[in-house]
Amino acid sequence: MIDAPKAKRRQWRKKRGDAMQQMQSGVLDHLPLKERWSREGKPEAKRKKLKPLTENFEQKEKGLVLSVHRRSCQVRLQSGKEIKAFYLAKSVDEAKEFPAVGDFALVGKSESGSENFIIGLEPRKSVLTRPGPRTRENQALVQAANIDQVAIVMSLENPSFNFGFADRFLLATNFNGLPFILILNKCDLMKKIPTEIQEFIELADNTILTSAEQDTGIEELKEKLRDRISVFSGQSGVGKSSLINLLVPNASLNVAEVRKKDGKGRHTTVASAYLNLPQGGAVIDTPGIRALGIMDLTTDELARCFPGFFESDIFDCKFKDCKHQSEPDCAVLRRIDEGLISEARYRSYLRILGGLG
């Protein structure tokens, strides 16, 4: 007798494979919406059916993608009107990219005039990526597009500073040539910044000490974000949503306390969103992701370019393939012994190195 959960999984995999074939052929765009993607082990969701589509769109207009959902996006058109636009499987397959928050898209209206569809994306000037889901971990998904800088929120206490998370963002911004702003929130909880965190501060382009509770550093933060498109990210519990509520008065983001049992945050941001700032510019609020995609980085490249390991960023280990583990005449291990590189950052490097291997 076949186990029921296994049978369901097989059925789901077959259906997913059929859907991929339909997407590549363009057939998927002509199916009722409720017959498209579904989560494993869950019944089909009851969704609105779309009428059969044609490729002749009478009205076309450019727009900015504000948020991305399962098969649709919220888009602000050039006229200022905000609409819901579905994205076509065929268009996604041709562009090799799903729409992302911050994208500039071409939106077409169906002949009936009742639905809007994203039919093309403009080239992106910059991106920030994250790993795909468990079944597609090697596939990079664009978290945000067309950004000017990356601002990450870290807390000094409750939860404690996470070097692995911060180092991944620092690497990603370095490789994309983007400015990196470090926001140290909850500064009221610690009188003195530890040496290892001070070491990381020196690697950031800008560092701002804030306290959402005491309204500290908010004006300085507003000035750094003015007239710029900034990714605003941070792990759960660091106070990112509280800061955004101060920056964007009408955002009204949910805020949750840190769990007492493990000191980790609760997820309150579930999807990326584009939020305009009153002083000009915008922040793209991203979920408290636990990892950032640096899949294109090799172990050799990481060992040669890890921020803060080398004076003037010049690799000076004896062997060109040194991974800074147990190799002789390793400049990084020597600097650790001399106290120039903290154990916390070295452990962060080893975790990232292990993930690439």
Image: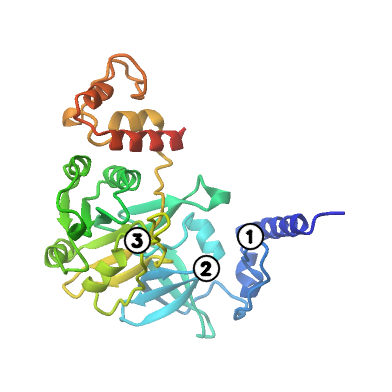
Say which of marks 2 and 1 sits in front. 2
| Whole-percent x, y for residue 7 in the image | 78, 57
- In the rendered image, which residue does mark 3 sit on? 237
| Whole-percent x, y for residue 181 in the image | 21, 53
- In the rendered image, which residue does mark 2 sit on? 70
- In the rendered image, which residue does mark 1 sit on? 25
Q: Secondary structure at mark 2?
A: loop
| Whole-percent x, y for residue 19 in the image | 66, 61
Cα separation, mark 3 vs mark 1, equals 44 Å
The quarter of the picture where residue 208 lies is bottom left
At 22% from the left edge and 52% from the top edge, which residue is drawn?
A: 182
Q: What amino acid is at disc 3?
A: Gly
Q: Is residue 146 visible?
A: no
Is the residue marked by circle 3 packed among few (<14), some (14-19), or many (20+) residues within 10 Å?
A: many
Q: Secondary structure at mark 1?
A: helix
Q: Secondary structure at mark 3?
A: loop
Q: Is residue 255 visible?
A: yes
Q: Nearer the viewer, residue 256 or 28?
A: 256
Say which of marks 3 and 2 sits in front. 3
